[in-house]
Image (cartoon, grey):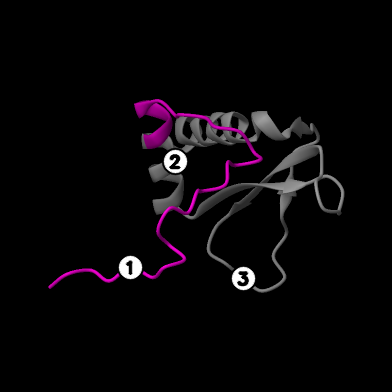
Amino acid sequence: MAVAFRKMDVGRKRRKSVMGTYFPTAEEMKADEFCIKNNIRISYSPETTGPSPKNWHISIVIGEYKKGEKINISPDSYPKNKCHEMMYKTCLYYYEKYRD
């Protein structure tokens, strides 16, 4: 069976990410997988609200989701092109801390 394409999909360019690109190492990917399996949620959140925040914080929540849970936010802020790198470094930290 052939896949049908809509006219608007053909020739459509993808937008580049405003957060920059980062290619994690194999060890960083392993650490990220460990964090996901062990309910360690690591992400980034903007320092200020608005259409294009310049600085971001790393957010960390450990344990199963609970309504109204406390989110731990890093004291340091990072420019948007460093967020992915710092997120994976945080994953590595928790991987080393809770591995065994």
Residue 80 in sight in this render: yes
Relative image position of residue 4 (x, y in whole percent): 27, 71
Residue 32 % position (x, y): 44, 41
Q: Nearer the viewer, residue 45 or 39?
A: 45
Where residue 95 appears, as percent x and y from the top left, is 46, 35
- The earlier-in-sequence mark between 3 and 1 is 1
Mark 3 vs mark 1: give the one in front: 1
Q: CA distance from mark 2 to mark 1?
A: 35 Å
For the residues bearing labels 2 and 1, Cβ distance under 8 angstroms: no
Residue 62 percent location from the top left of the image: 58, 52
State whether residue 69 is above or below residue 41.
below
Determine which of the numbered discs, if any, sits on residue 66 in the image: 3
Label 1: few (<14), some (14–19) or many (≥20) C-alpha neighbours in 10 Å? few
Q: Is residue 11 magenta?
A: yes
Three-letter residue code for mark 2: Asp
Q: Which residue is mark 1?
A: 5
